[in-house]
Image: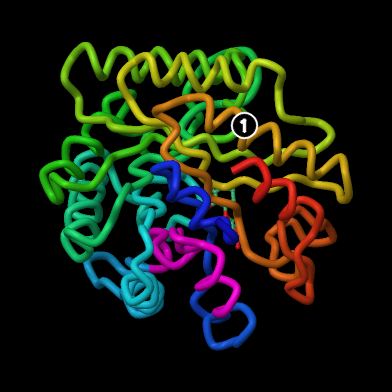
Amino acid sequence: ASTLGASAAADGRYFGTAVAANHLSEAPYATTLDTEFNAVTPENEMKWDAVEATRNTFTFGSADQIVSHAQGQGMKIRGHTLVWYSQLPGWVSGLNATDLKSAMDNHITQVVQHYKGKIYAWDVVNEAFQDGGSGARRSSPFQDKLGDGYIEEAFRTARAADPDAKLCYNDYNIDGVNAKSTAVYNMVKDFKARGVPIDCVGLQGHFNSQSPVPGDYQANLQRFADLGVDVQITEMDVAGSGTAQANSYTAVVNACLAVSRCAGITVWGITDKYSWRSGDTPLLFDGNYAKKPAYTAVLAAL
Ligand code: XIL
């Protein structure tokens, strides 16, 4: 096939991108999105500060814009994200434990119900583990006040609100076999053993020279898949340019295709000019929406 989405679909997978609602009115942005991709993730519009800046007052306008655009194009939608320490309104961090638990449950329930039936997969909890060798949980209002159990509480609450959406745990620096990915692995294994509802692990896939695509990337995807969950590459971008960048993209696509439970790949933006990694050129289309060597490599590998 001649586009990323169609090539991935021919193999039962999706190829998605992060989308920002405020760029949808830019013609080449929307055209590239609609031509090349068959899945979207709202880049910021579904985060807690965007949808519930004030307690129990929900604002879905920008996220709805992306969802209706995607639905009109028959695209899958990844919901991102329900519980995360970042882009969290100040009022949440100020709550005591009892209040925080009910605010978290209410947030999950309201947001997931609003999009019930429309979301392919939710990133229920994002970035809950520390970097480095400890394998410990990252400090956050949720972790510090509710303890380890907040993650399973979040997954159970999301399942109750939309039983048909896949529920993912999402994180970065879990691409290879390392202490952080093993901590996530152990959590997923425990959830599966105890019947806590989890369907997928999202590996963000933000690569650069300090964290290149690891040699054991495919093996790591496979060990998660072997626990009985899907794996999804959820936020891929690769610092750099030219052949080196193209080769990293190829390695990730090949690894995903080699793992039957690798459901799809999402890149974290369409064009370099709107990448969150400002000053870098980590995506598949340049600032003028021209296809880069990385694009050609991905299409060839898919
Ligand atoms: C980033 C967005 O791309 C930026 O626009 C925003 O300012 C900060 O967040 N991991 C995630 C994403 O899970 O939500 C982050 O997105 C990038 C890192």
216 left or right, relative to 288:
left
Total labels drawn = 1
Tell me where the magenta segment starts and ends, as one range.
30-50
Which percent across, then down, holds residue 98? 19, 41
What amino acid is found at the position of numbered circle 1 in the picture? Asn
Which residue is at 24% across, 72% downward? Answer: 57
Q: Secondary structure at mark 1?
A: helix
118 left or right, relative to 301:
left
Q: Nearer the viewer, residue 195 or 101?
A: 195
Residue 72, can we see it? Answer: yes
For the C terminus, give its image quadrant: top right
211 left or right, relative to 120:
right
Asked if disc 1 is less than 8 Å from ligand 1, the answer is no
Which residue is at 38% across, 70% downward? Answer: 70
For the N terminus, give its image quadrant: bottom right
Residue 144, can we see it? Answer: no
Quadrant of ligand 1: it is bottom right
Q: Judge whether 115 appears above or below 125 on screen.
A: below
Which residue is at 51% across, 13% downward? Answer: 182
Q: How is the image coloured?
A: rainbow
Which percent across, then down, holds residue 124? 33, 43
Q: Judge whether 179 appears above or below 198 on screen.
A: above
Q: Which residue is mark 1?
A: 254
Q: Is residue 285 magenta?
A: no
Q: Nearer the viewer, residue 147 or 279?
A: 279
Q: Is residue 42 magenta?
A: yes
Q: Nearer the viewer, residue 88 or 162?
A: 162
Which percent across, then down, holds residue 299? 65, 50
Which residue is at 70% across, 67% downward? Answer: 271
Which image quarter: residue 134? top right
Crowd band around label 1 with a 10 angstrom C-alpha radius: few (<14), some (14–19), many (20+): some
Which percent across, then down, holds residue 197? 20, 30
